[in-house]
Every structure is written in structure tokens, then in C-alpha cells.
Image (cartoon, coloured by chain):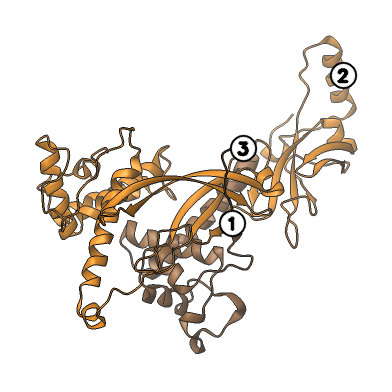
Chain colours: A orange, B brown
């Protein structure tokens, strides 16, 4: 399991005060927040910054982390005895870890410790037995294509979670789920897999797994809710004189009429040709006029003929002559 | 032959809405935080219930409400701002995303 240096991630020293950590976090949050950042790896960096902040801003977690950090830097592969109420790292599985593992493991330890504290409180003692708890719900993201949404798809999901072994110690468990994605699901929507979250405790039911759906970038369409948009290239004569052109839609090729005198940027709406639903979305076509290159003598003559036949000054609104 | 179990996912918006407990869990917040979010009008509940007259235990939430609540929770945490500011940020971010999507159509 890879050890992460949270101080390095937050660009502070291990002696940094809470105020220093807060300032460093704010600076990095502004830089890497995926909703405002233009950095390529913003999402990954923000996740790391949040992980580091979650631990270092909490005095108790920071103390536990510092102890772990000292052990790791002095060559020990596992933390010393007694750290964080007796939890210990299980042996690694020999595979290269990914970014989420270390944080998942730390988080689970702290959550487990909190559950233990809660379970050993006055209420629990009065009850005389451990209360059944529903397992935690888990959340993950899943990326599918527009076609998958249209037709439905079964996807294999690799999931990693922390579960308790027979001795009550948390272990990282990798599992694969085959999930049937419902037809018609849209980007941003959540789907639920009952009982696929964390196992319950003391006979409580398992939590659910929630997946938020994202669409992979499509080579043709942009998605907004159920509506799709696509740039539609047309020739100058199709735009000027009108005509019938073939357009690919998710439901197959269709023929579309282009009105005479259409301008670049004009929008056409194909009702019901977006994503399915009640009502189905629409497909918007944004016209783009594409000019054929004047690479042959015949093409050059044709352009010159056009200049004579339809003279106009496209810069008139700039107040200059043609 | 290896047997494979295929689990059918159900759309939250198609008959499997979220409870207030599930919302709190997904946002990594307390239930009171979700209650405030709803009572202040930052997210809506399903089925047009009268918020003030209905117990939070009976509230149900759609995907969009969950996504918005998660974003607000994240903005509050990431930028250390109050609920009102976080909700405003989420509105503005949503507008930016919509504009970027529109822009992409013209930039392709």
C-alpha cells in the first residue's frame, strides 16, 4: 500500500500550524477545484488535497497520521502497536496500489473507530447488546456512452471497499460486479444497487451502492439533459438555395430540409431525436457552412463567376469598401 | 462454466428515490444539514409535499437533488463557506458548465 505524504500534497511542513494548513488548503482548492479549475489533472489533485486536508485539519486524525508517518519514514511497513485503538494494516497483496487505496484505508479506520466509540457509549451499555446498524451506502461514478443509454448495457464494475475480517480488522476487498444499466438513463442521474454497499453490523441490512452516470464524450453530439446538439456542415449552395441533406441521429440516418438563405450558426430542431424519455429529447443541428477549396481551374472560375453573379460586401457593417 | 451474477440497477428517478438518511450519507453530512438544505429551499423534495408540515423521515429525493446537495456539501468543505455561499457557487458553476457545453458545439 502506497504511503501518501499529506504534508507534501498540501505544500506545508510537518510543523505547519492549523492556520497554515487552512491557508494552503484554500489556495489549492481554488487552483484545483474541478468546477473552476482549468488544470488537466484537477480532479485527481483536488481529491488528494481533500484527503490531506481531511486528515491534517482534524487534530485526532493528524496525530494518528503523524505516528504512522514516523513509523513509515523510519522503515517500518506497518504502524506501531496501539495506534488508533488497535487497528493495524493487513499485509499488502503485492499489487501496485492506486491513488484511492491509502485514503480509503485511513477513512475506514477512522469511521470504524467512531463506530466503536458509539457502540461503547452509555446508550449501548444500557441496551446491553450491540445495536444493529445498516451498512453504509457507497457511491461511485460510472461512465457510459450515449448508445449504452439508448440500448441499455451490462457493465463490469471493479469496486474496492473496506470490510472487516473474522478478527474485526478492516481489510481492503476488491470485487467485481456485473451491473445492468437501465435503458434511458441520463448523465447526472443516479442508479441504485440494493444491498451492494457495506455489510450491516449486528444483523443490520447491507447498505446500497449508488452510481452517478456520466456520458463519455461523443464524437458527434453534445448533451444537455435529454437534448443533443450537433454541428451540421452544409455546402454554400445548400445554405443559399436550400436542399435535403442526410443527418446521423442516435435512432438512425434521417433526411433533413435546409431552408433557402440559411446562415452559419442557424439552429434546426429535430423533435424527439434526442435521448429517449417522456417526453423524448430533441436534436439540435447548428449549421456550419463549409466552402470547397479552389484547387482546380474549374473551381476558381466558378468562384469568380459567383463573385460576378452575386456581388456583396461582407465588411459593409465595418464601414469599409469591398 | 463460471457463473456470473448480473445485478439490475434501478434508476433513483424511476421509483427508487433517496431517503433523508441516504442523502445525509451520500453527502457525508448529518441529517440536520439535509433538513436545513430543504427548509432553506436549496434543494427540493419529490411529490410536492408541504415541507413545514411533513416529517423529514417522509421526504424523498430525486437524482438532481442528490447531485446538487453533494455539490453544495463539497463546495462548503472545499472553500469553507456557509451554506448560502456554497449554494450560490453551485448555481454559478452549473451555469458555467451549461455555457461551456454550448460553446463546445460551436468550437468543434
Give the CA distance from mark 3 to mark 1.
36 Å
Give the image location of residue A73, x and y in percent: 12, 37
Q: In which quarter of the image is residue A136?
A: bottom left
**B23 in relation to A88, above or below:** below
Give the CA distance from mark 2 to mark 3.
30 Å
In the rendered image, the residue lying farthest to the top is: A297
| Res A31 visible | no
Q: As drawn, is A71 to the left or to the right of A22? A: left
- Residue B107: image tag: 3
Q: Residues within 10 Å of mark 1 (few under 14, many from 20)?
A: many
Q: Residues within 10 Å of mark 3 (few under 14, many from 20)?
A: few
Give the image location of residue A175, x and y in percent: 44, 45
- Is disc 1 in the same subunit as disc 2? no
Instruction: Determine the residue positioned at 40% across, 38% down.
Output: A41
Front in this rendered view, residue A46 or A141: A141
Task: Report the residue marked by disc 1.
Answer: B9
Instruction: Determine the residue positioned at 58% across, 67% down.
Output: B16
Camera-nearest label, 1 or 2 = 1
Task: Report the residue marked by disc 2.
Answer: A302
Regarding mark 2 in the picture, which secondary structure is present there?
helix
Camera-nearest label, 3 or 1 = 1
**B59 in relation to A283, above or below:** below
| Res A65 visible | yes
Chain of the residue displaying label 1: B
Q: Quadrant of the C terminus of chain A?
A: top right
Instruction: Determine the residue positioned at 46% across, 81% down.
Output: B56
Q: Quadrant of residue B22?
A: bottom left
Front in this rendered view, residue A56 or A155: A155
Chain of the residue displaying label 2: A
Amino acid at each position: 500500500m502506497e504511503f501518501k505524504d499529506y504534508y507534501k500534497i498540501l505544500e506545508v511542513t510537518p510543523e505547519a500550524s492549523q492556520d497554515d494548513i487552512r491557508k494552503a488548503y484554500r489556495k489549492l482548492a481554488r487552483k484545483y477545484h474541478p468546477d473552476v479549475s482549468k488544470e488537466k489533472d484537477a480532479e485527481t489533485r483536488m481529491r488528494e488535497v481533500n484527503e490531506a486536508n481531511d486528515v491534517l485539519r482534524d487534530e485526532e486524525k493528524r496525530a494518528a497520521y503523524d505516528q504512522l508517518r514516523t513509523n513509515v519514514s523510519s522503515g517500518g511497513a506497518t504502524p506501531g502497536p496501539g495506534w488508533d485503538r488497535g487497528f493495524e494494516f493487513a499485509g499488502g497483496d503485492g499489487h501496485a496500489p492506486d491513488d484511492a487505496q491509502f485514503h480509503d484505508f485511513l477513512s475506514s479506520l477512522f469511521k470504524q473507530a467512531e463506530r466503536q466509540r458509539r457502540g461503547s457509549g452509555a446508550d449501548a451499555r444500557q441496551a446491553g447488546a450491540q445495536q444493529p446498524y445498516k451498512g453504509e451506502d457507497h457511491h461511485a461514478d460510472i461512465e457510459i456512452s450515449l448508445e449504452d443509454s439508448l440500448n441499455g448495457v451490462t457493465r463490469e464494475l471493479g469496486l474496492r471497499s473496506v470490510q472487516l475480517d473474522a478478527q474485526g480488522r478492516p481489510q481492503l476487498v476488491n470485487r467485481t460486479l456485473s451491473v445492468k444499466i437501465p435503458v434511458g438513463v441520463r448523465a447526472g442521474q443516479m442508479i441504485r444497487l440494493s444491498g451492494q454497499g457495506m455489510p450491516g453490523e449486528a444483523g443490520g441490512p447491507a447498505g446500497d451502492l449508488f452510481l452517478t452516470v456520466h456520458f463519455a464524450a461523443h464524437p458527434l453530439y453534445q448533451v444537455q439533459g435529454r437534448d443533443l446538439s450537433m454541428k451540421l456542415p452544409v455546402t454554400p449552395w445548400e445554405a443559399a438555395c436550400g436542399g435535403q441533406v442526410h443527418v446521423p441521429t442516435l435512432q438512425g440516418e434521417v433526411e433533413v430540409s435546409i431552408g433557402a438563405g440559411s446562415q452559419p450558426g442557424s439552429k434546426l430542431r429535430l423533435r424527439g431525436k434526442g435521448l429517449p424519455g417522456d417526453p423524448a429529447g430533441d436534436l439540435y443541428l447548428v449549421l456550419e457552412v463549409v466552402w470547397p477549396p479552389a484547387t482546380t481551374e474549374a473551381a476558381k472560375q466558378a468562384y469568380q463567376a459567383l463573385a460576378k453573379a452575386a456581388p456583396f460586401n461582407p465588411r459593409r457593417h465595418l464601414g469599409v469598401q469591398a | 462454466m463460471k457463473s456470473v451474477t448480473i445485478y439490475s440497477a434501478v434508476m433513483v428517478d424511476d421509483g427508487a428515490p433517496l431517503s433523508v438518511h441516504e442523502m445525509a450519507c451520500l453527502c457525508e453530512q448529518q441529517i440536520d444539514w439535509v433538513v436545513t438544505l430543504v427548509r432553506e429551499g436549496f434543494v427540493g423534495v419529490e411529490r410536492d409535499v408541504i415541507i413545514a408540515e411533513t416529517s423529514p423521515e417522509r421526504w424523498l429525493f430525486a437524482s438532481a437533488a442528490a447531485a446538487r446537495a453533494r455539490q453544495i456539501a463539497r463546495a462548503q468543505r472545499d472553500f469553507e463557506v456557509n451554506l448560502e455561499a456554497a449554494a450560490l457557487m453551485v448555481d454559478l458553476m452549473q451555469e458555467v458548465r451549461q455555457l461551456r457545453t454550448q460553446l463546445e458545439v460551436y468550437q468543434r
